[in-house]
Image (tube, coloured by chain):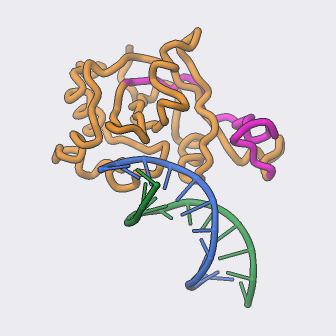
Chain colours: A orange, B green, C blue
Amino acid sequence: MTRPRRYWLFKSEPSCFSFEDLKNRPDGTEHWDGVRNYQARNLLRDEIKPGDGVLFYHSSIPEPAVVGIARVVREGYPDGSALDPASDHFDPRASRENPVWYMVDVRYERPLARPVTLAEMKMHPELSEMLLLKRSRLSVQSVTREEWECILRLGGVETIA
DNA sequence: GCCAACGTTGGC
DNA sequence: GCCAACGTTGGC
């Protein structure tokens, strides 16, 4: 297990797709599709690379929290759900020539020994600059190495060396 | 369920 | 290019 080069936080509503759901995938991987925000799209298309670390965050629940760690296993490629009229994420502007939206693949790595809640993050001085606390709606966002290590520590996980 | 924040759309 | 209207997200 190598140390990730860069770190990210991916949000998901567990009623839609949870960390457990990722764990239960036959190969532990999932296409991170359906992201429909340009800033997040740019990260998925251009910045997020295999080997990068992902904090898996559960949103829109009574106690929002980072619950586990995943790993990027495939870099950005066109999000086919935008082309599928049957998909909730269908976008008539997207085409094969101009995919508009991108996704990456992530793989389950490990749960935190205990979830790190949003309330806890808000109280921790080291995390006061986290994008999560400033731009709560951005569903894919960067995390600094210091923030990553702080959250793993709070979550009872030894830093991946 | 409410509401603030914020991204997108479209008229001008 | 501005900005009002509108839609969505997400914490509470």
Asked whether residue A78 is drawn in magenta, I would say yes
Task: Specify the quadrant of the image occupied by residue A78.
Answer: top right
Q: Quadrant of residue A7?
A: top left
Residue visible at 26% across and 23% down?
A: A114
Q: Using the rendered view, name the quadrant where residue A82 is placed.
A: top right
A34 or A44, which lies in front? A34
Image quadrant where one finds the C terminus of chain A: top left
Residue A158 relative to residue A98: left or right: left
Q: Residue at x 20, y 29 (%)?
A: A154
Res A31 seen here: yes
Please count the marks in the image: 0
Q: Position of residue C10 (x, y in %)?
A: 42, 47
Residue drawn 35% across the image and 23% down it: A3
Q: Does the rendering let one see residue A6?
A: no
Q: Which residues are magenta?
A: A68-92
Q: Is residue A23 above or below residue A96?
A: above
Is A160 included in the stretch rendered in magenta?
A: no
Direction from residue A41 to residue A71 in the image, left or right: left
Q: Is residue A69 left or right of residue A72?
A: left
Looking at the picture, how far across and down is residue A27, in whole percent? 57, 10
Relative to A9, A29 lies left or right: right
Residue A16, x across and y down, in percent? 55, 32
Residue under the image location 41 percent in, 28 percent down: A53
The residue closer to the viewer here, B12 or A15, is: A15
Q: Quadrant of the N terminus of chain A?
A: top left
Instruction: Compare residues A155 and B1 and report the one nearer the observer.
Output: B1
From the viewer's perspective, is residue A53 above or below residue B12?
above
